[in-house]
Image (cartoon, grey):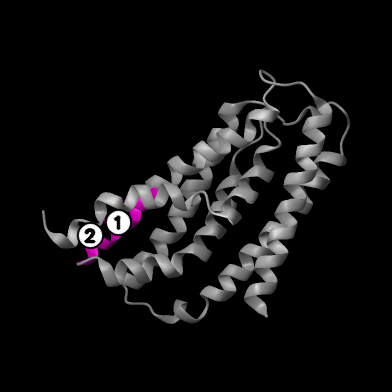
Amino acid sequence: MEAATFPLLFAAVIGFTHAFEADHLVAVSSIVTKRDKIILAIKDGIFWGLGHTSTIFLIGLLMIIGKVTFFNGYFGYFEAVVGLMLILLGIHRLYQYFRSDKSYRQLADPEDKHHLAYGVGLVHGLAGSGAMILLVMTEIQGSFNSLLYLLIFGLGSVVGMLVAAGIFSLPFSKKITNNAHLQVGLVLLSSLLCMGYGAFVLIENLS
């Protein structure tokens, strides 16, 4: 095995652990509070991972194959966009929960799609793309191996996030608990954490 391709073996593991970073977890915890079935939350995690992978791979393609360099000065702003998104995500979840009647509060519309999770993953991919792609470009030999690394990394992040989403959704599953007070408390907690951490990320990257 060539030394240059050896890091490919670890790409999935790195992607898996990357899914458990704080900004990812507060986002997915806010998203899955609307799910009363674990399978729906797991699908949210999968769509988040696909969105995250889509952005990283696209920017990687532009930088590695297209030799585009103008992204380098904007990655800090991308992080700030993630902070703003987390704030809006927390506000949206609170509004979504408290605006409607009691039947809605038994969590989610079963027909609800996974567009939100995919969109959140896309934005998170913007923030995480800079360091990841620069690391790949310095450590991996060849364009093909670099893009392959990003895809394997993305697959790992999909698996990591579906695990995280499944775990965070457990208190909201009808099969596990019908405790309405617990669910309300967790919706509030996850939304406030999402907004608070988003404000921290926003200020840190714009100050």
Q: Is residue 142 left or right of residue 159?
A: left
Disc 2 vs disc 1: Cβ atoms closer than 8 Å? yes
Q: Residue furthest top?
A: 175
Q: Which mark is residue 111?
A: none
- The part of the chain drawn in magenta is 142-154
| 189 vs 81, nearest the viewer | 189
**Quick check: can you spot residue 62?**
no
> Alpha carbon of mark 2 to alpha carbon of mark 1: how far?
6 Å
**Quick check: can you spot residue 148?**
yes
Q: Is residue 15 magenta?
A: no
Q: At 54% across and 52% down in the image, what residue appears? A: 121
Q: At 50% across and 51% down in the image, what residue appears? A: 51
Q: Amino acid at mark 1?
A: Tyr
> In the image, is residue 75 above or below residue 149?
below
* Few, some or many residues within 10 Å of mark 2 (<14, 14–19, 20+): some
Q: Which mark is residue 145?
A: 2
Q: Position of residue 104 (x, y in %)?
A: 81, 30
Query: Residue 44, located in which quarter of the rendered image?
Result: top right
Question: What residue sits right under mark 1 in the picture?
Answer: 149
| 152 vs 200, nearest the viewer | 200
